[in-house]
Every structure is written in structure tokens, then in C-alpha cells.
Amino acid sequence: MADAATLQARIDASETRVAKVVAPATTNLYDTLFGGTLLAWMDEVAFITATRFGRCPFVTVSLERIDFKHPIPAGTIVELIARVESVGRTSLKVRIDVFVEHMLKADRLKAVTGSVTMVAIDENKRPAPIP
């Protein structure tokens, strides 16, 4: 792996921010975001972040320590911010912070945090070194 300054520059450049609207199709009977929908969004943003960092194919190995701290109501905006947290030889860990904000108010609340481990793969779908 490259020196610390180069590694930090790659981490900074790979940070990914995605905003979503919590629409009725994504909510449960309690008018809050389905947990499974949020997990899919988190997995997607982790994949984008890993790919931006390594510029190679990645797959999800695990979702770890997902903490749902606050419900996410229908009609709100959700922002997912993903950042590479650690890098190994073939895998990396992406931390995702999920913020919720009301559309008509200037408030913002961290609702969910979690980590996703991604593994680089080769053409045979076997673990491969991260370039």
C-alpha cells in the first residue's frame, strides 16, 4: 500500500454522499423507513465508496454494528455519508453515518451508524489485493 499521505488522499477522494427521500414506497406500517431499505442503501453507498477507493471490483462481506438510534419518518431527507475507515490487503471497512432532516426545517440528526466490510475480488470472484 502507498505511504500515509497517499492513503489519506485516496480515503478523502473516495468519501461518498448520497441523499434520498423517504417516500411512501420505502416506509413500514409505522410511517418510518423500512430498516431493510436503509440497509440496502448503506450497502450501495459502501460499494460506491470502496470502488472509488480501490478502482477494482468489490463485494460485501459483512454489515457490522448497525445502530438505529432514531426513527426516520416518511417525508424526510436522508443523507448517507460513507468513508473508508481501515484498509487491509484484500478488504476494507467503510463507515456509514446516516442523517435525517425534515424538508421544511433546518434541523439535522444522526439517525443511524454502521460499518460494512468489502472485499476486492478478481475475475474468478476470489479475494484479490486492493491496488
Image: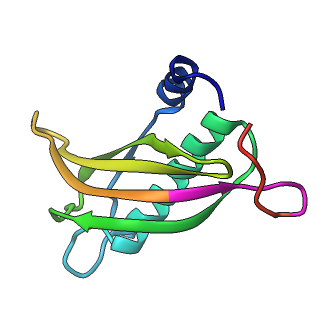
Query: Which part of the image, by quadrant, shows the C terminus?
Result: top right
Identify the image quadrant of residue 108: top left
Query: Which residue is nearer to you in this view: 69 or 103?
Result: 69
Query: Which residue is nearer to you in this view: 43 or 86?
Result: 86
* Percent x, y of residue 62: 52, 68
Q: Is residue 101 above or below residue 32?
A: above
* Percent x, y of residue 35: 34, 72
Query: Which residue is nearer to you in this view: 100 or 125?
Result: 125
Query: Which residue is nearer to you in this view: 48 or 128?
Result: 128
Q: How is the image coloured?
A: rainbow
* Percent x, y of residue 44: 54, 54
Which stretch is magenta? 117-124
Q: Residue placed farthest to the right in the image? A: 124
* Percent x, y of residue 96: 38, 49
> Is 1 left or right of 80, judged from the image as shown?
right
Identify the image quadrant of residue 22: bottom left
Total marks shown come to 0
> Is 113 left or right of 96, judged from the image as shown?
left
Identity of the residue drawn at 40% across and 67% down:
64
Q: Residue placed farthest to the bottom in the image? A: 29
Identity of the residue drawn at 75% across and 47% down:
129
> Is 120 left or right of 4, judged from the image as shown?
right
Query: Which part of the image, by quadrant, shows the N terminus?
Result: top right
Identity of the residue drawn at 10% across and 33% down:
106
